[in-house]
Image (cartoon, rainbow, N blue to C red):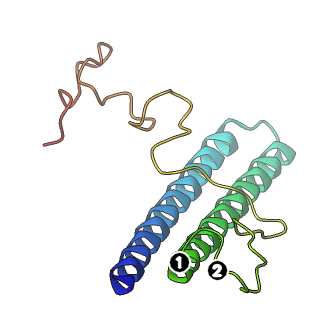
Amino acid sequence: MQAGKNAAAAAKEAAGNVAATAKAGMDKTKATAQEKVERMTAHNPMEKEMATQRKEEKIQQAEMNKQGVHEQNAAAKEAARLGGPGGVAGHPTGGVTGHVTTGAVGSHPIGTGTGTGTTTGHNPLTGGTHTTTGHGTGGRFL
């Protein structure tokens, strides 16, 4: 039974890490595209430099978020291996029920916290009734 829990925890960790890496990649790509737009619309070299600095900060933040999620996933897997969220009696964590990393940024579960109140992310074309362009998936992916 314990081997099944360990395998499930490992699979959960791997899936969470893949998702965090994909999100970080999307955030980095978005920052780069946003920088290009800002540099094209900039009126002087200082504005262009500021756009580049903002891009670098966003890329760094995305990487920190990804690392934080990886650490949380590893801690969750370790907790599952030890038999529960707080570990077992006598474990060096002293029964701490979460992973504490100074300077790490917390994350949200996949599909939540999009700011839209839905779990479809930021794609306005999902759901099938996008009236501006007439495009959409009809609520399903083909």
Task: Kindly identify the residue that appears in the image at 69 percent across and 56 percent down.
Answer: 106
Q: Which mark is residue 83?
A: 1
Q: Tell me which numbered mark, 2 or 1, is placed earlier along the sequence.
A: 1
Query: In the rendered view of the protein, which quadrant contains the C terminus?
Result: top left
Of the pair 73 and 127, the residue shown nearer to us: 73
Task: Kindly identify the residue that appears in the image at 52 percent across and 63 percent down.
Answer: 20
> Dots 2 and 1: beta carbons under 8 Å?
yes
91 sits to left or right of 36: right
Q: Quadrant of residue 65?
A: bottom right
- In the displayed structure, 20 sits above or below 49; it is below
Query: In the rendered view of the protein, which quadrant contains the N terminus?
Result: bottom left
4 sits to left or right of 49: left
Task: Kindly identify the amino acid type of the residue bearing the numbered disc 1.
Answer: Gly
Residue extending furthest top? 131
Residue extending furthest left? 142
Dot 1 crowding, Cα within 10 Å, few <14, some 14–19, many 20+: some
Of the pair 68 and 2, the residue shown nearer to us: 2
Disc 2 to disc 1, C-alpha distance:
7 Å
What residue is shown with label 2?
Answer: 88
Residue extending furthest front? 89
- In the displayed structure, 71 sits above or below 120; it is below
Say which element carries label 1. loop
Say which element carries label 2. loop
Q: Which mark is residue 75?
A: none
Provide residue 129's location: percent of width, then percent of height. 26, 17
Of the pair 47 and 116, the residue shown nearer to us: 116
Task: Kindly identify the residue that appears in the image at 39 percent across and 34 percent down.
Answer: 123
